[in-house]
Image (spheres, helix red, strand yellow):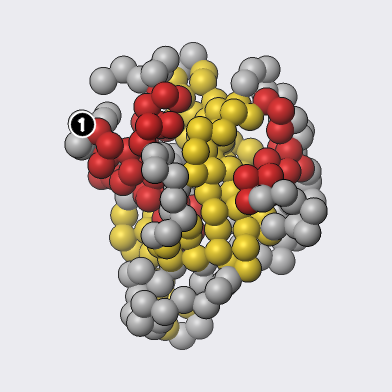
Amino acid sequence: MKLDNALPAYLRAALQPSTTEAIYSDYDLNNDRAGVLPDGKPAAVLVPLILRKTGWQVLLTLRSEQMPFHAGQISFPGGRCAADDADMQATSLREFEEETGVPQQQVKILGQFEQYHTVTNFRITPFVGVIAPPVRLSPDPREVAEIFEVPFSFVSNLSNFKRQSALWQGQQRFYYSIPWQNRYIWGATAGLLRTLAKRMQASSNGNLR
């Protein structure tokens, strides 16, 4: 199924109805919260899509080792809601521009999907947007060590996700990962990608490849 030209419209439909009611979290594979989550600090991320000659790509960042949370991990551009942000979408766009150097005016938002609650107590609202060319990246070195791309066809395929575990604060904890080449994408970022892939699979009855 070739979606190079049709993907934005397809995604826009898959993201309807736009909702934040269903909340996924780092606790879904672990039983230490018994289904009860704290309110969480409001945050937002952007899942940026870029059309290249090889097809649609998802832009991801490697966080600087100087960051107070999730240092050195792979994530989407995003962060905490600021007092002067109009809404969570504004937060995602502001953070995208700050971290990548790409003007937010180049982003066309397609929709949003289910919130995700992290073990570090952030309540993330994820948005999906297409980045119009030309894309000239100028990352903020205080926040971003590197920016790279992963094929959307890879991260939208549920069979590429793995359930893994590791010791954290003396406990065995389970999480999702989706390794790509030499990149280890895991935790909340993998959880968000998996949620989006599930949305697309449900929309296409499992026929999207």
Helix, strand or loop under label 1: loop
Image location of residue 59, percent across then percent down: 56, 36
Frontmost residue, 134 versus 126: 126
Image: 4 above or below 122: above
Image location of residue 186, percent across then percent down: 45, 56
In this rendering, position of residue 4 left or right of residue 59: left
Image: 50 above or below 139: above
Image location of residue 87, percent across then percent down: 66, 50
Q: How many marks?
A: 1
Q: What residue is drawn where x is 71% and y is 28%?
A: 105
In this rendering, position of residue 100 left or right of residue 16: right
Q: What residue is drawn where x is 48% and y is 60%?
A: 116
Q: Mark 1: which amino acid?
A: Asn
Q: What residue is drawn where x is 33% and y is 43%?
A: 199
Residue 37 seen in the figure: yes
Q: Residue furthest bottom?
A: 170
Check disc 1 and report the residue beneath it. 207
Q: What residue is drawn where x is 49% and y is 38%?
A: 111
Image: 7 above or below 161: above
The quarter in which the C terminus is drawn is top left
Frontmost residue, 14 versus 189: 14
In this rendering, position of residue 109 left or right of residue 82: left
Crowdedness of circle 1 by 10 Å Cα count: few (<14), some, many (20+)? few
Image location of residue 100, percent across then percent down: 71, 37
Residue 120 seen in the figure: no
The quarter in which the N terminus is drawn is top left
